[in-house]
Image: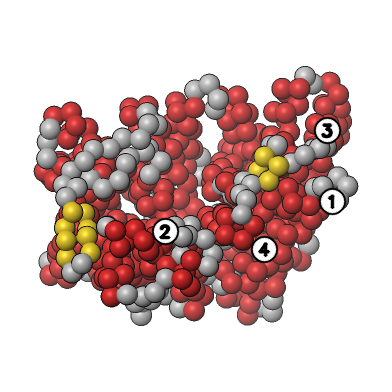
Amino acid sequence: MAVLGGVLLAAPHLLPAYYRSLTLAILADVALAVAWAFFSGPTRYLSLATGAFFGAGAYTTAVVMTRLPWPLPVLAAAAVAAAMALLVGTLALRLRGPYFAVFTFGLAELAKHTLIWYETGVTGTVGRLLLNPPGAVTLYYTVLGVAALAVGTAVWLPRGRWGIALVGIGADEERAETLGIDTTRIKIAVFALSAAFMGAVGGAMAPRWTYLDPQVFNPLVSFQTVIMALLGGATTVIGPVLGAVFLGILSETLLLQFRYVYMLSLGLVLIVVVLLLPAGLAGLLRRRRA
Amino acid sequence: MAQGGVHRIGGGAEAGLGVTLSPTLLLDVVVGGFTTGGIYALVALGLNLQYGLMRVLNVAHGEFLMLGAYVTFSLHTGWGVNPLLTLLITGPTAFAVGLVLHRVLYAPLLAGEAAESLESRSLLLSFGLMFVLQNAALLIWSADLRGYSYLAIPLRWLGTVFPANRVLAAAIALALGAAFYLYLRGSLTGKAVRALMQEPEGAQLMGIQTSRIHGLCFGAGIAMSAVTGSLVSMLFELTPFMGLPYTVTALVVVILGGLGNMLGCILAGLLLGLVETAGVYLASSDIRLISSYAVLSLILILKPSGLFGR
């Protein structure tokens, strides 16, 4: 752990720009997948809202970046995403199973089209320029910090009372409620915490693009996050990290050159993994060890 | 088209207030809504069959629509086959593909799986399928827009004008949807399907072969999607990315109509078509998705069993 931490801390000064940027993208994926898994893993609420929270965070940074000094836009992004999650969670978290998945999936599209409609109708311009972005090394440390906090939360959460409550909600929500757990409050709170990390990732990644428009609310972000977490094993901490690193490297290196062939084989790999590796990569490691 | 054109001009936030509700506009919205809604109803019916019966959320559903559309496009432009006749090819082919996919992918998953993780794993499986199909289409047909013109003749009725192909496509879609609904109500197989939806274990105890019915329904669902695609190819330009929006719309319709409720699904498809068309006419096209999601959110919150659910 300490070695890995040291390597990641030293990385931006040792690596050439391309690999630094690759590591940055993978760290962002890790943060998203881990944040998704610490809520959706134990509770089994399949959230497809990641793209919406990521987009909300990115847009928040774009709006406030000129007015606030650097790490503050990321905090604002986290706060906006968390507030959005509180609202959405209050409405949606009483839906179970596929209904919840569908509701959250629609969120990114809804946010995107509402924003387009608002910007064309009211402000008259669509999109934002991000001027004077912070340096690449600053961005790297910001994303590293967010990822480290997300992993820390994922490690710490299952050890406390709330972690047990989350597992109880996933196993049998009614029984958990009967046993005196305030399921609604815990679900919404952890959902918002997870959204805060997703918003922070969006906020920290936004300056990499110089121009941002509502297309940043991308449902593909939601899909990729779920795939990374489930591929690795969503009920562990190491699983989503493994999944994100694995898919992150693959997508960043192969996507640009052989886009269609890569995506096609990714789909095939996914199908094979689902049919043959039920507990994800983490489950495979555990079986090997046993 | 002149009158319809006038109504559509404007857009923006306050355009909705400027439009006067004339009888012609009302007719425009109603007929436009039904032609859109008929298409929605058929594609949603297919998804509802898979989803209501097996709890398999097939996000690749719209990809079969896309493939159906491309096959029709290729047959029509390559060999001059009438687009309507291609339905006889895309439908049965898709049905066979569905049977195979069920046997190879979903049957093993449904057989050996604890119910809790089934939902997320079948979802992941269909994501994989979506990636494979979409990128296969990109490799075969490239990302360029494709299209052809068929029956783009104006039909004049009560002072408004509609393209004949839209009316025809919606009529065929609704007729197929209605025929399927009657088949489910009337036939023995249909009875088995309804029994499995209501009481899976009880139905199995009565000697209904779950896996066989699942396979048939999966195939039928995919066939409906592909046939809808063949119809859609007469109306709009094709891209390999056209599938997902239809999947989303189908999901919205299924939830509006209530899981496993076929009549509700057809009605909800028409209703969504109407709401969207009204939204487009009264405000702007950006409002289309917003209005359908707003309807969905309201219904999920107020009545989670769907508009026509029990």
Are circles 4 and 2 on residues that touch, CB within 8 Å? no
* Residue at disc 1, secondary structure: loop
Badge number at residue B9: 2
Q: Is residue A287 above or below residue B173?
A: above
Are circles 1 and 2 on residues that touch, CB within 8 Å? no
**Cα distance in 3D space between marks 4 and 1:** 22 Å
Q: Which residue is mark 1?
A: A67
The chain ID associated with circle 1 is A
The chain ID associated with circle 4 is A
* Residue at disc 4, secondary structure: helix
**Cα distance in 3D space between marks 3 and 2:** 46 Å
In the image, A225: left or right of B279?
right
Report crowding for label 2: few under 14, some 14 to 19, many 20 or more residues within 10 A (C-alpha).
few
Identify residue type, mark 2.
Ile
Foreground residue, B47 or B175?
B175
Residue drawn where x is 57% and y is 55% of the image: A120
Identify residue type, mark 1.
Arg
- Residues at discs 3 and 4 both on one chain: yes
Residue B104 occupies quadrant: top left
Identify residue type, mark 4.
Met
- Placement of the N terminus of chain A among the 4 image quadrants: top right
Are circles 3 and 2 on residues that touch, CB within 8 Å? no
In the image, A164: left or right of B154?
right
Q: Which residue is mark 4?
A: A84
Q: Which residue is mark 3?
A: A135
The chain ID associated with circle 2 is B
Are circles 3 and 4 on residues that touch, CB within 8 Å? no
